[in-house]
Amino acid sequence: MDPILILWIGGGLAVIMLLIGVFTTVTSERSVVQQRLGQLTDTEIKRERPKQTSTPLTNWLNRRVEGTSWAEKVSRNLARADIKIKPGEYIALLVISGFFVGFVFWFLTGRSSILLGIPGVGLGVMLPGMYVKSQQGKRLVRFNDQLGDMLN
């Protein structure tokens, strides 16, 4: 089988899974804090909980990593960033982003050698972690901004 065809198929699957992940994150439930605060106010609007759809791949990954210290660490970091995905979905995102950025590096360097895509794979695997850290920082800033009001 032609390696370029494999890369195109893999890239297409990566983009599709990335779009599914973004859609799931955007349309996911409100955070636990928002739900608890909503219970205390009279103006909360009753909403149906959206159905969580997950793929067999992410279900399998979640079962495999469930209970490991790495999955607990990832879960904690995702919760701190208020990102509503499971550790298995995060693993899939790491693989997809690594493959996609590696393919882009390989493609942009003239398709002369697959070794030129390896730095892109490394960068692609690091991107989701950098995003999670930035979201954690933003959430911490929002929390600190509200802390003074709560103390008053």
Image: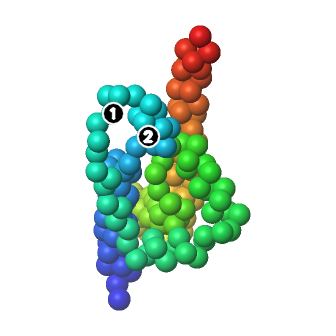
**Relative depth, front residue between 66 and 40:** 40
Q: Residue 26 carries which label?
A: none
Q: Name the residue under label 2.
A: 35
Q: In terms of depth relative to the viewer, which is nearer, 29 or 42?
A: 42
Is residue 88 found left or right of 56 in the rendered image?
Answer: right
Amino acid type, mark 2: Gln
Q: Please indicate, yes or no, whether residue 89 appears anywhere in the rendered image.
A: yes
Contact? badges 2 and 1 (CB < 8 Å): no
Q: What element does badge 1 sit on?
A: loop
Residue 91 percent coordinates (x, y): 53, 65
Q: Residue, x 46% and y 73% (percent of image)?
A: 59
Q: Whole-percent x and y of residue 72?
A: 65, 59
Q: Please give the residue where the numbered disc 1 appears in the rendered image.
A: 44
Note whether 92 is above or below 9 in the view shown. Answer: above
Neighbourhood count class around disc 1 (C-alpha, 10 Å): few under 14, some 14–19, many 20 upward: few
Q: In the rendered image, which quarter contains the C terminus?
A: top right
Q: Nearer the viewer, residue 124 or 20?
A: 20
- Give the tally of numbered discs: 2
Q: Is residue 121 visible?
A: no
Mark sitting earlier along the chain (2/1)? 2
Q: Residue at x 44, y 40 (%)?
A: 35
Residue 28 in picture, x, y percent from top left: 37, 50
- Label 2: state its secondary structure: helix
Specify the farthest residue to the bottom. Answer: 1
